[in-house]
Every structure is written in C-alpha cells, then in structure tokens.
Amino acid sequence: MLEKLKVDVLEANLELVRRGLVLYTFGNASGIDREQGLVVIKPSGVPYEQMKPEHMVVTDLQGTQVEGSLRPSSDLHTHLLLYREFPSIGGVVHTHSEYATAWAQAGRSIPAYGTTHADYFYGPVPVTEELTAEEINGDYVLNTGHAILRRFEGLDPLAIPAVLVAGHAPFTWGRTAADAAYHAVVLESVAKMAFVTATLNAEGAGVSQCLLDRHYFRKHGAKATYGQSSEPHK
Ligand SMILES: O=C(CO)[C@@H](O)[C@H](O)COP(=O)(O)O
C-alpha cells in the first residue's frame, strides 16, 4: 500500500542528509495521501543510510499505525496536527539545520531581509512562543504542533511554508514531501544569510512591501512569470 508515497518520503528524508540539514538520526520527513487519509513517515531512530522504502511507517491522521513493523518518528503527532489543520499541505519536514535552529533557539523570527527570502516566504519566518512547563510535561509533541498553529493564526501556510519552534528547531511543509524538503533547504540558506545580515546591519536591512510582492508573486500564484512561463519576465 502507498508504495510510491513511501519511495517519495524516503527520498525527501535522504534529501535532508544530502543537503547537510540533519546529522545521525535527527529530523524527519513525511507525506500524506489525502484520498486515503494516510500518512507515511520515517521510522524513529533509524540511521538514514539504512532506511529503505519498506521501513516507512503508515498511520492514519489520528496516529493509529496501519502498516510497518517499526515505530514511527517521535515527531509524528506534530506532523499529524499540521496535516489535520493545514488541508493544503501534502508534506512536512523537521530538521535541526544549524542556522534555522540558531534563530529558533534565540527565539527570533527570521525577518525578510532580501529578495532570496522574498522568493520563497511571503513575510518573516515566524517563531512560536516557548512551550510552557505544562505543555512540555503534557503531550509535548502534540503541543509543539499547537504552538505552531497558534503562531499561524491569520497566516497562509503555503505563503510561509516554514516555522521556527522556539528553543527547538524548524518545521517546513509544502504540497508534497519533496516540496517540504525543498523549503527546508531554502530556509537554511535564508537563515544563514539573515544571520550575517543581522550581524552587519540589522537596523537598516529589510525588503519593502513592494519588493517582497514583486519577488514572491513572480514565482507564486496565478500571475507567476518565473521560469518557462509563457508570460514575459517582469
Ligand atoms: O526533534 C527531535 C529531537 O529533538 C527529533 O527530530 C529527532 O532528532 C528525530 O527523531 P525521530 O524522527 O528519529 O524519532
């Protein structure tokens, strides 16, 4: 069941390794089959180099395991909450990539400092509030998801496909598991540039709304003109 999705999810996980976003067994990627309401996620604590499609774990949206002999990622319930609440997404990724994690640990959103950011994120990449002791001692993984949802009230998750969990690390998402991994790669690059920018000139840096619009909508939405579109570049 879901053999293609298992291959795609494994590939998204391996992309994180190839791009240097995860060490050892850090991080995880998942994907969802919306028609069947089933999620495929990597197994917990298995080294990436040993992972095969048949090691992927299948659960329903409540976390009941329907396939796979290994235990699912320990972050499963954060992924599931995002799938339940963001119906437009089809893949979720979590990494501990260094620069994005540094911003998360600092409890700071990543400002839209330039056009690289604006090409992918329509505004700052937000940071959640810190989880309370009650949340940490309770259903920690699910509460991590709730902290993300609170931060995304009023935001479009496809326009800003990333979040920093305060004191923890980033989550990204997209229409597919591959998209979510792609956003994790871009986020790390943007986070690194933002760190250097903040070091050099935090006060004076930042894109105008006009430049943000110009870059974001060149690549996204019905009027996108980037790449091999039939529309002229603007
Ligand atoms: O956030 C964490 C640890 O802080 C996790 O990302 C682990 O690093 C990976 O866990 P599994 O997916 O292997 O359970």
Image (tube, grey):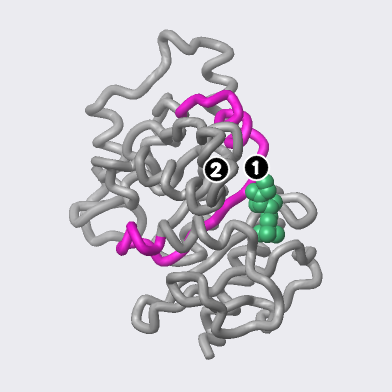
Disc 2 packing (10 Å; few <14; some 14–19; many ≥20): many
Tag 2: residue type?
A: Pro
Q: Residue at x 46, y 63 (%)?
A: 80
Q: Residue at x 55, y 84 (%)?
A: 66
Please determine whether, in this image, residue 86 is positioned above or below residue 55. above
Q: Residue at x 48, y 47 (%)?
A: 143
Please determine whether, in this image, residue 124 is positioned above or below residue 26. above
The residue pinned by badge 2 equals 170
Q: Position of residue 175 (x, y in %)?
A: 39, 63
Determine if residue 191 is in view: no
Decide whether residue 85 is among the magenta residues: yes
Nearest to the eye among marks 2 and 1: give it. Answer: 2
Decide whether residue 223 is among the magenta residues: no
For this rendering, which residue is in front, 185 or 78? Answer: 78
Q: Position of residue 141 (x, y in %)?
A: 55, 52
Determine if residue 156 is in view: yes
**Residue most toward the bottom?**
1
| Residue stretch rendered in magenta on the structure | 83-109
Q: Position of residue 181 (x, y in %)?
A: 54, 57
Mark 2–mark 1 contact, CB under 8 Å?
yes
The quadrant where residue 227 appears: bottom left
Q: Position of residue 226 (x, y in %)?
A: 32, 51
The residue pinned by badge 1 equals 97
